[in-house]
Each structure stands twice: as structure tokens, then as C-alpha cells.
């Protein structure tokens, strides 16, 4: 198991191994026996994010300070909805969000709220945008809902073709339907094409009401960063809300040589971020920022016993939907304080350099086509063979992915670019180096050589 990411067992074998854990019985187990069972039956099938061969996931082993913060959070089991349930927990989350706003240069009026995932952050951002649009139309969306609009079928959210699938969840859950989601093509750098955005918005004018545009700050397929500043200017002209989905990429704004990619981010109305990716803190840990704390007001709900109007102290629960909130801010705070910004930036830079080095190698490789220049820590490529027809080359990428996955020693992923399957290398952990990426490529090329 020393070099395996997980056992490599089939789904059926894993389910068979874990059946004893869910065999609930009248009598309990001694803790020593339970520990033995978990270590013997479960742990071999868990993914080892700390290995340099883990190159297809957005997960990372815990940083030391984050692990300590998680230990304290677990021991004290604090809910942090408001001052009533945890004075220290609620206050720390509020202070953490303010400090993060300053760190990312989001402006003096900005604020944030800690959520369970980027999916929920994106959904809440679209709700806030819809509420804002309703206010401009002269009614309170909280009271009247979609029925307040003269023609709800005109409502639209514009995203890039590479936007995260959670935006589909957002329009579904808000009752808008997937027909409300309109895609904009990406350019040759895999970023939202601003020219195409302007053209599409012009075509929609008069027939659809575009209340929100979503810029992706680090797409999940290629890590591309949409030109937020340019998109913000378009949104200002159209009167549309701008949400920046930075769940994957926002952390790289802290790396000085990458900061220019995020120019104009402070102009976004809302920004989503997942610290549980690059920051190596426990899952779940996500944040939704707003350029003005007043924009969170539509989320506030009060009751006679909970979140009382006259309750003293900070109340993070008034800025998001969940009324049960974990102490997720503590591991993040402990991690940043333990590392300091200098070491944190070094940690963030490491996988970027690994992917860049890998890209430079692929550009010179006769049997591989890199499909884009990397903005961040993701690179998509295709293994090629002159003897294969285009359809067989497509099947080759899927075959390489499945074969590597089945062995359990490495993880790559597969996506589609331009309608064609592509292998996708992801570097999150500092353990992933250019050499380890090249080792995975070597295995892919051996698999390709035996493809016939």
C-alpha cells in the first residue's frame, strides 16, 4: 500500500468490505474493536491525497495548523450561528471574514459568510442577484417570489461554456429552470470571450432579462481565469449583477506573479471561494464574499427564540441559509497564522510551478498535445498516435484514464474540451511536482503503446 492511492478494489469489493461497519446491532462494540474494524476495513479504501501521484482531484492533506484548528473545533463541537450558541465562535467567524476581505482587496464595505461548499455559495449568490433584480423592479422577492415578475420566463443567468455545473443546480433550485442558463463561448485561452458576451447580451436585450453574469475565476476543467475586470464593465453597462466563482482559483490571487489575472475582482458583487482546496483545511470550508455587507440582508431571518432581532453580539447566521453552522473558520485561521503569508504563498506557488514545468515539457513532446497554456494549476492534454483515426484517439484518452484509475496507484481525470475527451492533470498539493506529473505521463504513454 506504500505507493497506492487507495486499495484499487472494485466498487463491489469496497461495499463488501464495509458491510460490517453498517451492520447495526443491539449491543455496542468496544472502542478498541471499532478502531480495528475501521483501520482494517475502511482506511485501505480511502484516498491518500498526500501522495505525489494524486493528480486529478481538488483535495489536499491537512496543513499542520489547520489540523490543530480542526482538532479544537471537533473537541468543542461549536455551532457558530450566533452569539447565543458560541460567543467566541461567532465572533471569530465574523473577524475571519473581514480579514479575508482585506487580504483579497475586496474593499472596506465588503463582508463574507462561511458556507458548506462552493455549490451552496454559487446558489446563494444567484439568489442574492435575483433579489436585487426584484428590488429594481419595485418589489420584495422574499415576499412575492418569482410571481412578482411580469414574465419570469424572461429571467436569465449568463455564464461561460466552462462554468461549474453547480450553476445548473442554482437555477433549478430557484425555480428558474435550466432554460435560464445561457452559455458564452470561451476563447483560445479557455476564458470567457468578452466579445461574445457583449454580442449575446445585445441579442438578448428586449427578450430576456439578464439579472446575473457569472465569471469563473479558475474553471474546473482547465483552471482558466475569466477577465473579471472587463466582464465587470459589461455588467455595469447592462445593469446586471456580477458573481465571480473563485471556488478553485481565488487563492492564487495571493501569488504576486498571478495577481494581474484577477484584476477587477473587487468590482464583483459576490465572490465564491473554497479554502478546502488549495489552503489544505478540512472539508467543508467555503466562503461567499459580497462587495457590500448590506447585500446579505435578504438572507436574514428572525424568530422568537433564535436569531432574535434584539439579540446582542455578532450573528453570522443572518448572512446565509443554514441555521446549523460548523466552526469551519477556526482551521482556516489557525492555518494562515501558523504558516504566515510568506510560507502560504510559497505553498500556493509550488503546484503552479509544477504545472508550468509540465506544460513546457509537453510543448516539446512529439506524442502529446497540450490543449491550453495554464493560468493556474491545471493542464489538459491529449496523447496522440499517428496510426489512429480521430475516433480512436478519443477512445484512447478514455482508455488511459480508466486504466490508470483501475490500478489505484495514480489519479488523473478526464474532461472534454471542444467536444473531445482530454486528460486533465491537477496539482493542488505541494507534493505534486513536475517530475511526478511526467511519471504519470510516462505511464499514460505506455498504456497508449499497448492500446491496439
Image: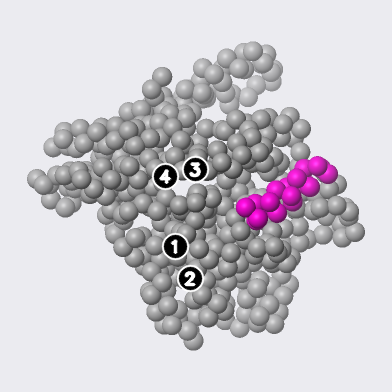
Our reading of the magenta stretch's main secondary structure is helix
Residue 66 horizontal/vertical position (percent): 62, 35
Rounded to the nearest angstrom, the CA distance separating label 4 from label 2 is 25 Å
Q: Earlier in the sequence, mark 3 or mark 2?
A: 2
Going by the image, does 85 lie left or right of 433? right
In this picture, which residue range is highlighted in magenta? 86-103
Q: Quadrant of residue 64?
A: top right
- Quadrant location, the C terminus: top left
Q: Are marks 3 and 2 in contact (CB under 8 Å)?
A: no
Tell me the number on the disc at residue 341. none
Q: Quadrant of residue 162?
A: bottom left
> Along the horizontal axis of the image, is 20 left or right of 258?
right
Whichever of labels 1 and 3 marks the residue nearer the N terminus, that label is: 1
Residue drawn at x 61%, y 58% is 105
Q: Nearer the viewer, mark 3 or mark 2?
A: 3
Q: Is residue 130 above or below residue 368?
A: below
Disc assigned to residue 352: 4
Quarter of the figure with residue 334: top right
Residue where numbered disc 1 is placed: 226
Q: Which mark is residue 231?
A: 2
> Residue shown at 77%/43% (left/top)?
89
Q: Residue 49 at what x, y percent from top left?
A: 47, 32
Disc 1 packing (10 Å; few <14; some 14–19; many ≥20):
many
Amino acid at each position: 500500500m506504500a505507493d497506492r492511492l487507495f486499495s484499487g478494489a472494485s466498487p463491489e469489493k469496497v461495499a463488501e468490505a464495509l458491510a460490517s461497519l453498517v451492520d447495526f446491532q443491539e449491543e455496542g462494540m468496544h472502542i478498541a474493536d471499532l478502531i480495528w474494524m475501521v483501520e482494517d476495513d475502511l482506511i485501505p479504501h480511502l484516498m491518500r491525497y498526500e501522495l505525489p501521484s494524486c493528480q486529478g482531484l481538488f483535495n489536499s492533506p491537512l496543513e499542520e495548523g489547520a489540523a490543530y484548528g480542526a482538532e479544537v473545533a471537533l473537541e468543542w463541537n461549536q455551532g457558530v450561528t450566533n452569539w447565543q450558541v458560541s460567543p467566541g465562535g461567532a465572533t471569530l467567524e465574523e473577524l475571519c471574514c473581514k480579514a479575508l476581505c482585506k487580504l483579497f482587496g475586496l474593499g472596506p464595505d465588503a463582508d463574507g459568510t462561511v458556507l458548506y461548499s462552493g455549490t451552496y455559495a454559487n446558489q446563494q449568490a444567484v439568489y442574492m442577484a435575483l433579489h436585487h433584480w426584484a428590488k429594481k423592479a419595485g418589489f420584495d422577492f422574499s415576499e412575492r417570489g418569482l410571481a412578482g415578475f411580469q414574465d419570469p420566463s424572461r429571467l436569465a443567468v449568463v455564464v461561460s461554456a466552462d462554468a461549474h455545473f453547480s450553476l445548473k443546480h442554482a437555477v433549478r433550485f430557484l425555480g428558474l429552470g435550466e432554460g435560464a442558463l445561457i452559455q458564452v463561448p470561451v476563447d483560445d485561452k479557455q476564458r470567457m470571450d468578452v466579445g461574445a458576451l457583449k454580442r449575446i447580451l445585445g441579442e438578448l436585450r428586449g427578450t430576456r432579462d439578464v439579472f446575473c453574469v457569472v465569471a469563473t475565476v479558475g474553471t474546473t476543467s482547465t483552471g482558466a481565469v475569466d477577465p473579471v475586470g472587463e466582464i465587470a464593465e459589461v455588467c455595469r453597462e447592462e445593469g446586471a449583477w456580477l458573481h465571480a466563482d473563485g471556488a478553485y482559483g481565488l487563492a492564487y490571487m495571493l501569488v504576486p506573479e498571478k495577481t494581474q489575472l484577477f484584476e477587477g475582482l473587487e468590482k464583483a458583487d459576490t465572490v465564491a471561494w473554497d479554502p478546502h482546496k488549495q489552503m489544505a483545511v478540512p472539508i467543508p470550508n467555503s466562503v461567499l464574499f459580497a462587495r457590500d455587507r448590506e447585500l446579505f440582508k435578504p438572507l436574514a431571518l428572525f424568530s422568537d427564540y433564535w436569531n432574535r432581532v434584539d439579540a446582542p453580539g455578532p450573528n453570522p447566521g443572518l448572512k446565509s441559509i443554514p441555521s446549523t453552522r460548523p466552526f469551519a473558520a477556526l482551521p482556516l485561521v489557525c492555518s494562515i497564522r501558523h504558516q504566515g503569508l510568506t510560507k502560504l504563498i510559497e505553498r500556493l506557488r509550488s503546484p503552479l510551478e509544477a504545472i508550468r514545468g509540465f506544460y513546457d515539457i509537453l510543448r516539446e513532446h512529439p506524442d502529446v498535445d497540450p490543449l491550453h497554456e495554464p493560468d493556474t494549476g491545471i493542464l489538459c492534454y491529449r496523447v496522440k498516435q499517428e496510426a489512429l483515426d480521430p475516433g480512436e484517439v478519443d477512445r484512447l484518452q478514455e482508455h488511459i484514464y480508466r486504466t490508470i484509475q483501475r490500478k489505484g496507484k495514480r489519479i488523473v481525470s478526464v474532461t472534454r474540451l471542444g467536444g473531445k475527451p482530454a486528460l486533465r492533470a491537477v496539482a493542488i498539493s505541494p507534493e505534486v511536482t513536475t517530475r511526478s506529473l511526467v511519471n504519470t505521463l510516462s505511464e499514460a504513454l505506455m498504456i497508449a503503446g499497448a492500446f491496439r
